[in-house]
Amino acid sequence: MSIYDGILRGMLLEEAVLYILSFSGYTPIIPEDHNEGHFKGDKLKGRGTVHQVDAIGECWHTPAFGHQQRLLVEAKMKSKNGVGLDVVCKSKAVLDDVNQFWNSKHRKIGLKRYHYQYAIFTTDRFSGPAQDFAYAHDLFLVPMSEHAGLSGLITAIRKAAQTIDERWVQSPEGKDPDKSFPLKAYREFVRKELGTRTKDNMVLISTYVNADDFINDADMSNLVDFVKACHQLPAVWMGTIFESVPILLVSEPGFLGYIQRSKGGGKFWENIEEVDDDLKIHLIHDHEKELFYLESYSIDESPRVKDDKVRVFSFSLPMGMIMNMRSALEADANYQPIKFRHETIRDDVVATGNIPLAKGWQAAIYAAIELYERDEYDEPDEIGD
């Protein structure tokens, strides 16, 4: 296994995240497709230098007092020490530099301004210092581990990265010091197959395929399997908890049944008072998996029993960040902390609202915090410690 295995895992996870974000209000941005003065080739210009940022999403909605928002996405998968302070410090430096790119001369030439944000997704854990730094400097951390609904995707990423890596290092191209690893070709192929390469003037994948046959049939087969795993994902929505911490809401087996039983044609509600008691969702924390589950009663029409519930969604939290939000736990009993937005231009679907939690949801958060404070969560070691 060479360094390319890790590079491929990160790239494929980034592309999967961009695909998921495309259903939550973000359009993937391809630098070569945007001749707007803010890119230099495939690199993003900052005040001090240019930056290689391969995954960028542009929000479809812009607030009245703000520039159009773009999200810089970084994905980490099975790094040696988890995601530590070094990663988030580098992210902060990149974010500050690109947000300070503009000056008065750009206004005079009509260069559009954007507001950039930064999110790190990982299948690993975030260290405590990394979470503290991210919270203080307005970086977003999104854990993706342990979700049953994501297991097929994670498996496909590992398989594709390992197989392509093994073929490359044994191939004549891989042994030729004058040949570079065709990561861009793999990324272009994936974006074309996922449909996240949206511009008409896109660089055709055939230009890469025909260049010394960098992408052979075996590589394509593994990348196609990854694309299929993305297309077969269950409902995955981006949401927030306490109106500030992003969460990845991954649907569980009970999701479709819950939607079918929901009043109003399968919609969630803005007002918790509109929800029947047997449709309200209970928040449960699984200490072993470090996951939160949203559970509702079973769709079975048999008489209800106390524990007759099915899981609707699961999500994970970087608990070090939630520690800073104790005041939200003391809010009004009817306060609904979990909000979501799901939309896609392709299907002309927009769904927004609150997850209608039953009373007592605070107990699950308190239980998780208590475990965290007792150091029952093993923190990854910081590099250099």
Image: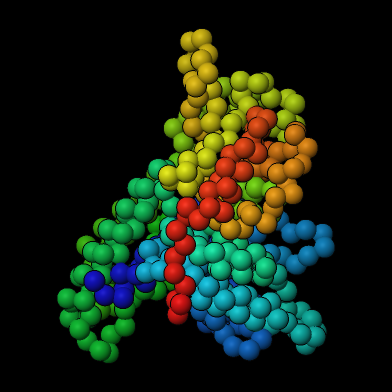
Identify the residue shown where x is 28% and y is 85%: 179
Identify the residue shown where x is 47% and y is 47%: 290
> Is residue 35 shown to the viewer in this render?
no
- From the viewer's perspective, is 383 left or right of 90? left
- From the viewer's perspective, is 31 left or right of 203? right
Give the x, y percent position of residue 110: 76, 79
Q: Give the residue furthest to the right.
A: 65
Q: Is residue 268 above or below residue 125?
A: above
- From the viewer's perspective, is 102 left or right of 41? right
Instruction: Count up the numbered dots.
Output: 0
- From the viewer's perspective, is 67 left or right of 361? right
Q: Is residue 341 above or below residue 125?
A: above
**Who is closer to the viewer here, 261 or 367?**
367
> Is residue 335 shown to the viewer in this render?
yes
Identify the residue shown where x is 46% and y is 77%: 385
In the picture, residue 234 is in which quadrant? top left
Give the x, y percent position of residue 160: 29, 61
Identify the residue shown where x is 21% and y is 76%: 169
Give the x, y percent position of residue 287: 47, 43
**Who is closer to the viewer here, 12 or 384?**
384
Q: Give the residue furthest to the front.
A: 374
Tell me the colour scheme of the image. Answer: rainbow
Q: Is residue 355 above or below residue 114?
A: above
Quadrant holding the N terminus: bottom left
**Who is closer to the viewer here, 149 or 342?**
149
Q: Is residue 217 above or below residue 24?
A: below
